[in-house]
Amino acid sequence: MNEAAIRHRLVERGEILFRTAREFTKFTGNTAADNLLNDLEGHPHAFVLACVMDRQIKAEKAWIIPYRISEHLGTFSMREVVKLTREQVADMMSGPERLHRFDTMSDLFHLAIQRIAIQYSGDAARIWKGKPSSAEVVYRFLEFEGVGPKIATMAANLLARIFKIPFADYFSIDISADVHVRRVFSRLGLCPSDASIEQITYKARALHPHLPWHYGFSKLGNR
């Protein structure tokens, strides 16, 4: 199969996944935690905070952190979450169950809450409301302390693919070059098995310049 045929098949499957109705997504395997993360209308900050926490630990462990904090508080309403002090967040994340391997992540969690409260008037959904450009959404995630291009792109990817949030365009959402994507690109002969993240990213752009993330690899948008 030549590259043009491979591109057609990948994009075709991507279109099918993109056009399907929004479904409940199992981010953690914990039903209560996943209910919170899927509640983009009532608790959009849970999704944003989970993205901020997704750093150098298993995704499932990172994404369950907002729920673990909610267990301490008995709620995860922004009205209550914003009252947390830096010290309180540090205490919740350090024990009795350590929520993240890095102590600094509690500061990033607290700073993210404050940014949502100040920059977005407590409504994290304002990050993506109003059909902004994909570049603007990625940029808004990059403004959160500790968030780099990989996490910012992943967040925009999930919003578009999983939650069906409409953007003005999708040019700036790159593919997330994780192990699964690397394996698929290698098996299809698109990139060598030891290809760098940059090589995979630019190959995806070359295959589909307008929608470089738009391939049907994973129900979770290549998390």
Image (cartoon, grey):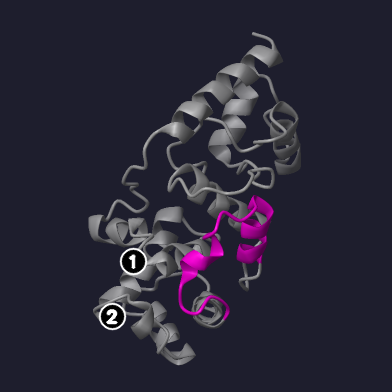
Residue 78, image x and y in percent?
38, 78
Q: Secondary structure at mark 1?
A: loop
Q: Secondary structure at mark 2?
A: helix
Residue 137 on the magenta span: yes
Disc 2: CA contacts within 10 A as few (<14), some (14-19) or many (>=20): few
Task: Find the magenta span and give its range.
Answer: 119-142
Q: Kindly check if marks 1 and 2 are in contact, taking CB atoms under 8 A apart as contact.
A: no
Q: Is residue 6 above or below residue 185?
A: above
Disc 1: CA contacts within 10 A as few (<14), some (14-19) or many (>=20): some
Which residue is depicted at the point 36% across and 67% down? Answer: 43
Residue mark closest to the camera, 1 vs 2: 1
Q: Which residue is mark 1?
A: 42
The residues tagged by marks 1 and 2 sit, at their Cα atoms, a distance apart of: 19 Å
Which residue is depicted at the point 67% across and 56% down? Answer: 149
Q: Which residue is mark 2?
A: 72
Q: Quadrant of residue 1?
A: top right
Q: Earlier in the sequence, mark 1 or mark 2?
A: 1
Q: For this rendering, which residue is in front, 179 or 157?
A: 157
Kind of residue indicated by mark 2 = His
Residue 223, image x and y in percent?
50, 46
Which residue is depicted at the point 39% across and 68% down? Answer: 65
